[in-house]
Amino acid sequence: MRLVRVTDEEIKAAAESKIRHDKALQDMVNKPAPTWTVKDIYGKTLSLQNLKGKVVVLNFWFTSCSPCIREMPHLNELVAQYSGKEVVFIAFANNDEASIRAFLEKRPFHYAKVPNSKLVNDLYNIDSWPTSFVIDKEGKIRLAVNYNDNIEQIISAAIKAAL
């Protein structure tokens, strides 16, 4: 192991970067969600345009992201809680399909999973993982949130408000 000293300037730059990122996410709230058409790991085409009239929950993650893995059981609970309702759950992963499939052999994740998500990441200003969005039935972003210990409650409240 090698220790690296972090300068005050680097700490300040990291804090400023986080502030810019959080502001970019919050600036998206109450605005139309960027549209996309993608294929999930099973070859099913998913399009935000075709999901109008439903609440859409997006999660941006990758297979070696510790906070992403920690929140998955909570996200899976949301899928179970809203089963049979007009809510769709989609996860955009930075990983390729093979990596996602290997990951899923050890850990369940009940969202529809989309591989190679860089283009969609860019549309949603993703530079921190995990990040989740709730999009209402009209296609407006109602929630944009990074990892939080209370993620299940935060997303559930936004879903309820959007239903």
Image (cartoon, rainbow, N blue to C red):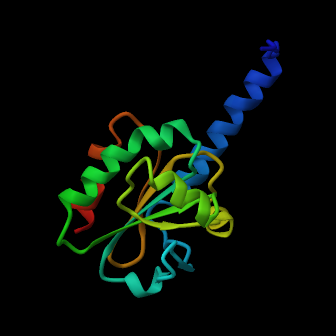
Give the image location of residue 129, x and y in percent: 57, 46
Q: Examine the rendered structure and indicate whether residue 4 appears above or below residue 31.
A: above
Residue closer to the observer: 42 or 9: 42
User: To which quarter of the image does residue 97 belong?
Assistant: bottom right
At a point 37% along the width and 83% down the height, the residue shown is 52
Give the image location of residue 122, x and y in percent: 67, 63
Residue closer to the observer: 103 or 39: 103
Question: In this rendering, would 19 be left or right of 78?
Answer: right
Outermost residue toward the bottom in this view: 50
At a point 79% along the width and 16% down the height, the residue shown is 8
Residue closer to the observer: 13 or 45: 45
At a point 18% along the width and 57% down the height, the residue shown is 81
User: To which quarter of the image does residue 35 belong?
Assistant: bottom right
Q: Quadrant of the N terminus?
A: top right
Q: Examine the rendered structure and indicate whether residue 103 appears above or below residue 58.
A: above
Q: Examine the rendered structure and indicate whether residue 110 appears above or below residue 10.
A: below
Give the image location of residue 143, x and y in percent: 40, 56
Question: In this rendering, would 14 be left or right of 48?
Answer: right
Q: Could you tell me if residue 147 is visible in this image?
A: no
User: To which quarter of the image does residue 160 belong?
Assistant: bottom left
Q: Examine the rendered structure and indicate whether residue 50 appears above or below residue 93.
A: below
Question: In this rendering, would 68 be left or right of 93?
Answer: left
Q: Could you tell me if residue 62 is visible in this image?
A: yes
At a point 52% along the width and 72% down the height, the residue shown is 41
